[in-house]
Image (tube, rainbow, N blue to C red):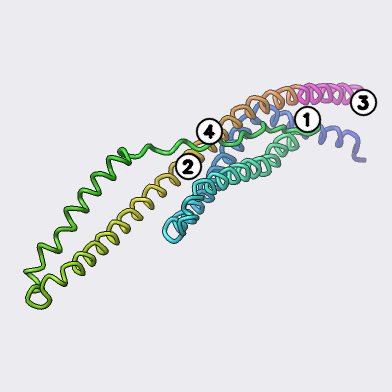
Amino acid sequence: MPDRYADAVLARRRELRALRERLAGGHRGELRTCLALSRLAATGAAAAALAGLRREAAEHVRRGDRTDRERLPERVAAAVAGIAAAAAAGWAAELGPPLRRIATERGLAMEPGWPRLPAPRAPGPPPPPDPPPGSPLLAGVIEGAALGRLALLPLAALPLAGLPALGGPALAPLAVGVGLAALVVAARVRWLAAERQRLQRRVEQIVGAAAAAIEADLDRRLVELELAASAALDAAVLRRRAAVDRELALLAADQVGSRG
């Protein structure tokens, strides 16, 4: 007749030995792997969201009116704060199950609510804008002088165009007005292009600072979590290994007693 009790004891001892091998320290390597993968996923999601924000902001820079352009830096700053909060929440939601699986596969008894992830920190205020390249008053004086010199060009070009032969001096004010209007339009176009370039640099400055802040805060949380989780797992592994050793010893003594 088969000895079912002895077979059960042997099967349980094999199970406990296999469990003891899993308690030999491999949990640290799995923990580091989980943290590294979580960092890649979180930074990738944040980078994709920030890239979308850049594209949307660039569209507002190109097509928005003056009011939209004036409010764009404030809106971008609010958007990057939302992206940072979403990245922190997504990281926490994705990292919890793999960490709990490390403990579950080894039969570790962890405290309720484990793992407790470090709280995120919101990005600080956006960096101050770059100072203007020069004094606005001096730039206005220089630009006015330049426009004054350019305004004399239509008068100088009148004889070349044959205007005196057609209308004489009577057409001079019209030509000057047309020339000045063209100069104003050209100056407006140049000013608008310069403003859009400045605004695009400002948006990139805000988004770049936010990306650096998100990565720095994520690295901080990863370091804090690795220290806390490693200590908690080490303590749980020691407790579990001691329980496994006690059960193995009891089974060995029971098997010897049954043979006797």
Residue drawn at 33 percent across, 53 percent down:
191
Residue on which disc 2 sits: 206
User: Counting other residues with Cα less than 10 Å from the Cα at mark 4, is it few (<14), some (14-19), or many (20 or more)?
Assistant: some
Residue 258 placed where, x, y %? Answer: 92, 26
Q: Residues within 10 Å of mark 1 (few under 14, many from 20)?
A: some
**Residue numbers of the magenta segment:** 239-257
Report the disc number at residue 243.
Answer: none
Mark 1, secondary structure of its residue: loop
Residues marked 2 and 4 touching at CB (< 8 Å):
no
The first of marks 3 and 2 along the sequence is 2
Q: Amino acid at mark 4?
A: Ala
250 magenta-colored = yes
Q: Nearer the viewer, mark 1 or mark 2?
A: 2
For label 3, count other residues whose C-alpha is less than 10 Å away and answer few (under 14), some (14-19) or many (20+): few
Q: Position of residue 132 (x, y in %)?
A: 35, 39
Eye-nearest disc, 2 or 4:
2
Question: Which of the two discs, 3 and 4, sits closer to the camera?
Answer: 4
Q: Amino acid at mark 3?
A: Ser
Mark 3–mark 4 contact, CB under 8 Å?
Answer: no
For label 4, the SS is helix
Q: Which residue is mark 3?
A: 258
Main secondary structure found in the magenta portion: helix
Report x, y in % for residue 156.
10, 62
